[in-house]
Image: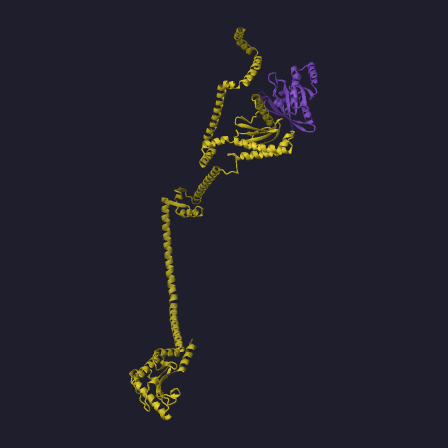
Amino acid sequence: MQEKDEETISILARYLAQIISKSATQDPNGLEQALQSIISPVIAKEISENKDKMIDALYPIMGGMISKYVAQAIKELMETINKKIEQGFSVERYKRKLKAKLSGVSETELLLEESADAHILAMFIIHKESGLLISEAHTEESNIGDPHMVASMASAIKDFINDWISNNKAEKEEVQILSYGKETLYIESAGSVYLIAFLDSDPDYEMRSDINDFFASIVKRYADFFQSFNGDDAAKEVHELSKKMYAYLISHNDRQPDGNNKKSFNPAKWGLIFLLSALLFYVGYRLKIYYDMNMLENRVTEQTGEIVTIKNEEGHYILKGILKEPSHFKAIQNILSQSPYAKEIGVDLSLSVGGVKKLIAQQKKQLEAQKEMLLRLNNAYQKDLQTLKHQVVPELDTLKKEQTQLKKLLESYKNEKRKLQQLMELEKNLYAALDHAFANNPYYIKKTHNLNFAPLHLFEVGKVEPTGTKLPLVTASFKKYLHVLLPYKPYIKQILILSFSDTKGNAVHNQLLTEKRAKNMLSYFLKDPAIAHSPMRSLIQTRGEGEKFPVMVNGQEDMNASRRIEIQFTLDHNKINSMINHYLEKQ
Amino acid sequence: MISRKIVLIGDFATGKTSLIRRFVDNQFSDTYLSTIGVKISKKIIPLEKTTLQGMIWDIEGGTETKPVNKTYLIGAHGAILVADGTRYETLEHIEMYRALLHKNNAKIPLVLVINKCDCLSDEARHAMTEKAKTMYGDGIKNIFLTSAKTGEGVEEMFFAIASEIVGS
């Protein structure tokens, strides 16, 4: 039997190829349907019963395909990176380079990071059963089209895939990521709804977690609304959801490295902004200076007709030019002084040959004019001088005379003032001079400014001739007295030699006795030539005082002391007073 | 505005896609049908008291070897059962589709459509209508003879299912 079957199979095999080939030409649809109805269930059965065997059988093909697609994906990624690197003069490249330098992260890593940054373009919340859109939010740049249709279609696709997965796997799983090109749909299901996020690239684990957290918060808050959703998009919850999703979408995109995140500080970005700002400012500053310098050059040319250039030489601006007209030096200096750059611009101007000749001619002319002017001035000066001489000299002489007279008057006045002063202080000065001269003389009486020789007992009882060894001392004292009084001679009325007697005996006798003793004392003094020829001689007079002024000691007369000689002077007060009055009147 | 999911279901090549193309405002490419077995279209349907936004799911026609994807039927608020007037067996298969729909939602409003009526003779029209009438009830609230080619009955049919959905 078995042999018969093998024979039958051998015969059928011989003709089967021909039958299939013929059917393929005559009725391709019929053949396709016939084969499909046989082969498909067989393959499905084989996969379900011998999964491992099928995997082993398919791996050489599928593994190769997977490797091929992975390699292709890496190639595309590298191409993207290379393309970005090759964007030679783009601002983005320099931004990236700067960021790499500032952050210490390589440019390739940054590019990979950029490649991995996913932005959410739109978010849909879809009713799971009906596939109806409950709410959605999308960015302005997203090109979603009709969100209701997109939601339904996405729901259909998800259902299709889920259905396909559940047919092929024992465990029920749901599709979470759908990618097409760069676009990606991230799907998260919960309760009666699911959320679909449309992204511009695959979300990483962190981003998925973030979306899930957001979705969980939405589901928790609106669970009742979702369950009772009746397709009415006028419900307030629909708008609330839309707002929440939009806010999330914007905040999420702002958090991305290339989003416009204003909350986080990005040193590379701000560093770049700062450098660019500084560069712009510097360029602007340089351009302004360049413009101002050009304007200055033009102003010089407009106002003077001279061609000048302002050049920057080793950081200093120099105005250079060869002038035709010497007077333009000053004009250019004036223009420069009015410029805000006056202190920053040096001047290096020279004259052309013609200009130099002009300058020499001008200077010569100026010198001649100055010379002529000086001559004129000199003549005028001489003339004025002569006139002045005639007018001034006599006046000067008069003034000199007046000055001399005034000097004399002044001298006279001073002299008289001095004399007046001397007169007013004469008595005081005289007494002071005597006190000073006779400070150590025991016979000088300070109170009366007299000389009293009583202690010397110059006269014996009844005798008229002075005696004793002390007589030279008396003469010396008298001579000194005269010497001190000499400067005051014009104002001294007299110098008196007074003689006193004791009270013993007759008063008349004593009177006569004292008169003789006074005269004898004068005679003794005159034996000295200095006294005899003294200018004061004419003023010396004698007088006998008799017994009128005896010397009393403890109530009894000292007879020896009573017989004494005293010398005193008298000032001419009338004369002094009249002179004082005379000077005072003059003053 | 209220959105509702409306499914079109019926055998392969009964003219479901053509009916939608005739009626809707906005639709995806037909290529989706051959890739994932469904195509979504949208139609704003103004009714007497409200306006309905119909999200119309054109489900790939079933065959003996490839049944329709039941997942697409879940959550439908109304369904249009489409048969080809020129193929009798497609009308017979309507029962199967009704059963599928009732499995998910026993109260789902249904409309039965005999399409391609422009190709039918009066006799054939009558025969098909009579057969369809035997299916009336049990969810089917209306029967329409339509032609995607001439437009006959198309709009009326869509408005009818919309009214049934809103009224249900």
**Residue placed furthest toward the front:** A1
Give left or right: position of A529 versus A584: left
Quadrant housing residue B101: top right
Give residue B39's position: percent from left, percent from top: 60, 23
The chain letter corresponding to yellow is: A
Q: How is the image coloured?
A: by chain
Q: Nearer the viewer, residue A264 or A482?
A: A264
Residue B87 appears in the rendering: no
Give residue A182's position: percent from left, percent from top: 52, 27
Q: Nearer the viewer, residue A79 or A490?
A: A79
Give left or right: position of A468 versus B167: left
Give residue A85's position: percent from left, percent from top: 45, 30
* Above or below, comparing residue A34 to residue A322 in the picture: above
| Image quadrant where one finds the N terminus of chain A | top right
* Above or below, comparing residue A209 to residue A21 in the picture: below
Residue A104 appears in the rendering: yes
**Chain B shade in the render:** purple
Total labels: the figure holds: 0
Give residue B37's position: percent from left, percent from top: 59, 21
| Image quadrant where one finds the C terminus of chain A | bottom left
Give left or right: position of A410 versus B59: left
Q: Nearer the viewer, residue A33 or B123?
A: A33
Give left or right: position of A377 versus A274: left
Quadrant housing residue B9: top right
